[in-house]
Image (cartoon, rainbow, N blue to C red):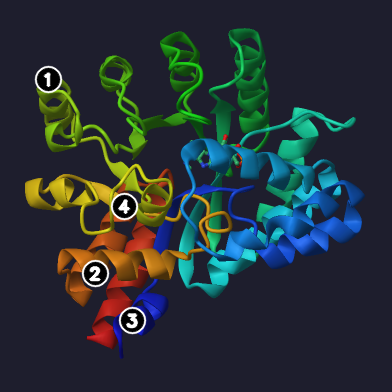
Amino acid sequence: MNTLEFCRVLPKIELHAHLNGSLSEKTLKSLGCLNKSVSEYQGLTSINNKIERTLHECFELFKIAHLATKNPDSVYLAAQSVIKDFADDNVRYLELRTTPRAEDGMTKEEYIESVVKAIKDSKKPLVKLILSVDRRHDILVSQNTVAVILSMRNKYPDIIKGIDLSGNPHLGCFDKELFNKAKENGLKTTIHCAEIINNDEVMEILNFGPNRIGHATFLNPNYSGSIENWESYCKKKIPAEFCLTSNVVCGTAKSYKEHHMQEWIKNGLPFSINTDDKGVFCTSLSEEYEHAQNNFNLSNTDLWTIAYNAIDHSFASIQEKALMKKELKEWKTQNQ
Ligand code: 6MZ
């Protein structure tokens, strides 16, 4: 069995996947039939080319993807297809994240209802929802988003588990008050952190102490992070969500080999491997595991351990974690 074959059969845990960035070209085309506004997407064959894009260009692509999900039916179909794609890639547990959008008569609540319905209707994998606050929104819009997220979490406590700060890292800033409110109300927190060089913001995020951080690209001192922040991080050991292809395509990591994940491996720090936006970056979780193995000299057992450890980093319940661990252990026994 070659590396990719092994990575495909390995039961995997995905913790960092943005819904609208995960739409496959096929799904986008099919949604185009339902929603004429997405015909603009037809020229976007570049989605399959894995060409280098700047972070700014990626954020232009998301705007186009958003044209495909402007009403509750298309949001439902999008979520359903992304969940199926992950199931087909042998992902056993998926934390899907998305930014609730109110537009064209659809409310943020209706947007969330559609994603929750797709999750409830899917048989596998086990899926939990993280709702995102977009960095580009002002404080009033963000406060409203958090209020909506909290009320929807009260309605679907078994599905809506966390809150995320994402969006173009060149815009906006981390607002501690906002995330404290979410934390005090029982939501788990994950924050995109150090996706660009911004040591002051990284310090604020580390002081806040989220449950997980996304990307962590410029956190280690060998990657322009401050020594102070790195020392603080090493004490807190907040699990990082790595997305290798996303960083390489956006040019924030120079290559797979030079990806900052190596600092976490070297220092025994907690992390998981994820896709970020499998549609936009034309990847799959299996391929991300394959890149990790090929570039960091990891054995099959190391890959299994990365997947196994991700269970502990997840926002699943203790019982759900125990079931997943049992499943992965059984798989290991049968496949050794
Ligand atoms: C920061 C990102 C991102 O929420 O509409 N998003 N935010 N860094 C990234 N790295 C490349 N990739 C995706 O999915 C698309 C949204 O997710 C966030 C952006 O806000 C983007 O608009 P949803 O489902």
SS label for mark 1: helix
Amino acid bearing label 2: Gln
Determine whether the beta carbon of the residue marked 4 sits less than 8 angstroms from the nearest atom of ligand 1. no
Camera-nearest label, 4 or 2: 2
Label pair 3/1, CB-CB below 8 angstroms: no
Under tag 2, what secondary structure? helix
Mark 4 or 2, nearer chain start: 4
Q: Nearer the viewer, residue 75 or 114?
A: 75
Residue where numbered disc 1 is placed: 228
Which quarter of the figure has residue 244? bottom left
C-alpha separation, residue under disc 1 versus residue under disc 4: 24 Å
Mark 1, residues whose alpha carbon is within 10 Å: few (<14), some, or many (≥20)? few
Q: Which of the two labelled residues, at mark 1 and mark 4, occupies the earlier sequence position?
A: 1
Residue contact at pointers 4 and 2, CB within 8 angstroms: no
Instruction: Tell me if mark 3 has few (under 14), some (14-19) or many (20+) residues whose alpha carbon lies within 10 angstroms of its own.
Output: some
Identify the residue at image location x=14%, y=53%. 265
- Three-letter code, disc 4: Ser
Determine which residue is flagged by label 2: 293
Figure quadrant of residue 26 = bottom right
Q: Which residue is mark 3?
A: 6
Res 272 label = 4
Measured Cα–Cα span from mark 4 to mark 2: 13 Å
Indicate the quadrant containing the N terminus: top left, top right, bottom left or bottom right. Answer: bottom left
Question: Which one is closest to the eye, mark 1 or mark 4?
Answer: 1
For the residues labelled 2 and 3, the Cα–Cα distance comes to 11 Å
Q: Is residue 335 visible?
A: yes
Q: Earlier in the sequence, mark 3 or mark 4?
A: 3
The C terminus lies in quadrant: bottom left
